[in-house]
């Protein structure tokens, strides 16, 4: 399976800036290796231009940063998977730590979104990860297990391995400049792999596990080759085509 190189643009970039960066990215990754796939999560307002910039490039996928688990309804300010598909998105993030910790999303709600997004036909990247307090309290395995179980709770028939990925993002490493080192990444990804294999006996071994947390051109080389790392989810260093293209090709 291809390595998934994903960019989370969070609440940055106007529509015009996003389209410009997306076009620069396509140009800078002209020689995209066969085993790489690029996924960009722009703000909702910038999705259309990024879809346009990626048109005709099968290996460049656009996704939403969030969705609501319904096709439509009285949910002011929310966006449905169907609306994302309608715009040309093929993917969505669920459970990003900023949504869990700033916007108060529960494990259960993340599970509902994950199941609904998958059933709607979107590739879904479920984000999980522990806080520093949880890590220091020795709760790493418990937290990852709880978040994965709840994230997958509503999926009665398992998942298609091509359509589902997990991003392990230790909260203490997101946007802080602190990267988990190879031993911490290996340990956490090994734990995630074991839990996935238990929860999803048919597909768990093949589901891509992405690492996220202060990934940059200088550390991509040592991260992407680690066991059980099948991609990365990048925030800050994905905002400029120059640095994200180095990560994509790194
Ligand atoms: C993220 O937002 O998912 C992320 C990993 O951010 P950063 O790369 O800036 O730590």
Image: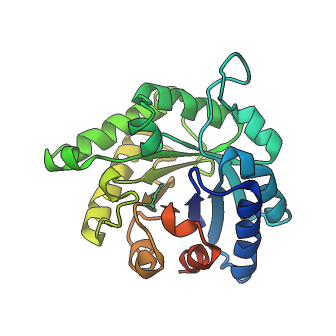
How far across and how far down the image is residue 156, in percent?
54, 26
How far across and how far down the image is residue 87, in percent?
81, 44
Relative to 202, is 73 on the left or the right? right
Residue 228 is drawn in which quadrant?
bottom left
Residue at image position (37%, 37%) is 147
In this rendered view, identify the residue nearer to me: 123 or 175. 175
Residue 180 is drawn in which quadrant?
bottom left
Residue at image position (56%, 31%) is 113
In this rendered view, identify the residue nearer to me: 76 or 201. 76
Relative to 39, is 216 on the left or the right? left
Instruction: Kindly give the residue lying farthest to the top in the view shown.
Output: 74
The colour scheme applied to this rendered structure is: rainbow
Using the image, determine if residue 95 lies above or below residue 208: above
In this rendered view, identify the residue nearer to me: 206 or 40. 40
How far across and how far down the image is residue 75, in percent?
65, 20
Relative to 33, is 225 on the left or the right? left
Residue 118 is drawn in which quadrant?
top right
How far across and how far down the image is residue 14, in percent?
70, 55
- The number of callouts visible is 0
Residue at image position (60%, 45%) is 65
Using the image, determine if residue 105 lies above or below residue 12: above
Residue 153 visible in this rendered orientation of the protein: yes
> The N terminus is located in which quarter?
bottom right
In this rendered view, identify the residue nearer to me: 57 or 49. 49
Residue at image position (24%, 47%) is 140
Residue 231 visible in this rendered orientation of the protein: no
């Amino acid at each position: 399976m291809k390595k998934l190189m994903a960019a989370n643009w969070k609440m940055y970039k106007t529509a015009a800036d996003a389209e410009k960066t997306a076009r620069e990215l396509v140009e800078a990754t002209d020689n995209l290796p066969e085993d790489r796939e690029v996924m960009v999560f722009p703000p909702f307002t910038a999705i259309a231009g990024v879809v346009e910039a990626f048109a005709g490039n099968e290996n460049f996928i656009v996704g939403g940063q969030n969705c609501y688990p319904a096709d439509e309804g009285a949910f002011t300010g929310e966006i449905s998977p169907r609306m994302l598909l309608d715009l040309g998105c093929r993917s969505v993030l669920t459970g990003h730590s900023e949504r869990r910790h700033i916007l108060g999303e529960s494990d259960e709600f993340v599970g509902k979104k994950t199941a609904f997004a998958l059933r709607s036909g979107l590739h879904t990247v479920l984000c999980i990860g522990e806080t520093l307090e949880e890590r220091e309290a020795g709760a790493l395995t418990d937290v990852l297990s709880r978040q994965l179980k709840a994230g997958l709770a509503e999926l009665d028939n398992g998942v298609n391995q091509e359509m589902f990925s997990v991003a392990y993002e230790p909260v203490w490493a997101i946007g802080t400049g602190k990267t988990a080192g190879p031993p911490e990444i290996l340990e956490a990804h090994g734990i995630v792999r074991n839990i996935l294999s238990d929860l999803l006996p048919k597909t768990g071994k093949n589901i891509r596990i992405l690492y996220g947390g202060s990934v940059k051109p200088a550390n991509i080389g040592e991260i992407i080759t680690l066991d059980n790392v099948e991609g990365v989810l990048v925030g800050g260093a994905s905002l400029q085509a120059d640095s994200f293209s180095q990560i994509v090709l790194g």
